[in-house]
Image (cartoon, grey):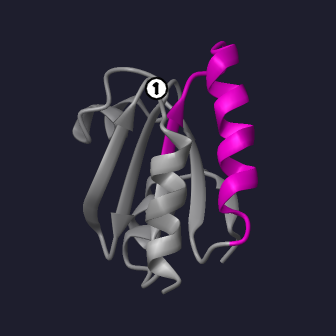
Amino acid sequence: MKALMLLESEAQFKMLLTQNQPVMFYFTKPNCNGCHTIFNKLANLVESFPVTLCKINVDDFSELAQALSVFSHPTLIVMVEGKEVTREVRFIQLEKVKQLCEGWVQ
């Protein structure tokens, strides 16, 4: 499994939920410049941790976003074995994400 990916289907999303390693779902919109900046920083931050970072375009997956109560962007939902462990909305605290990732490698 790639550590960094763009969601291509809902079947792929369901498959990611079954992984043993943590998955970060990053919900964004194509026209959100701040979202892209934060995503790049987030991608750099998690590249050395055992986590999958999956970028989801809410325009392409609006039903999925709605089902997960994603109403603002960016929204970062971290799941482990299909269960949500944390959520960051609009102001992604990279230090908090880093601490979470560090906890997975201990």
45 left or right of 101?
right
Which quadrant would the N terminus be assigned to in this image? bottom right
Query: In the rendered view, would you say 47 is above or below 27?
Result: below
Q: Is residue 15 visible?
A: yes
Specify the principal SS of the magenta part: helix
What residue is at 70 percent from the left and 15 percent from the top? 33
Query: In the rendered view, would you say 82 is above or below 37?
Result: below
Q: How far across and how far down the image is residue 81, in percent?
A: 32, 76
What residue would you read off at disc 1? 91
Q: Quadrant of residue 34?
A: top right
Q: What crowding class fits label 1: few (fewer than 14 Cα within 10 Å), some (14-19), or many (20 or more)?
A: few
- Give the amino acid type for the residue marked by disc 1 in the picture: Phe
What residue is at 72 percent from the left and 27 percent from the top? 37
Q: Which residues are magenta?
A: 26-48
Q: How far across and how far down the image is residue 78, in percent?
A: 39, 56
63 left or right of 40?
left
Q: How far across and how far down the image is residue 31, in percent?
A: 66, 13
What residue is at 26 percent from the left and 59 percent from the top? 84
Q: How far across and how far down the image is residue 50, in percent?
A: 59, 77
Residue 91 belongs to the span the image colors magenta: no
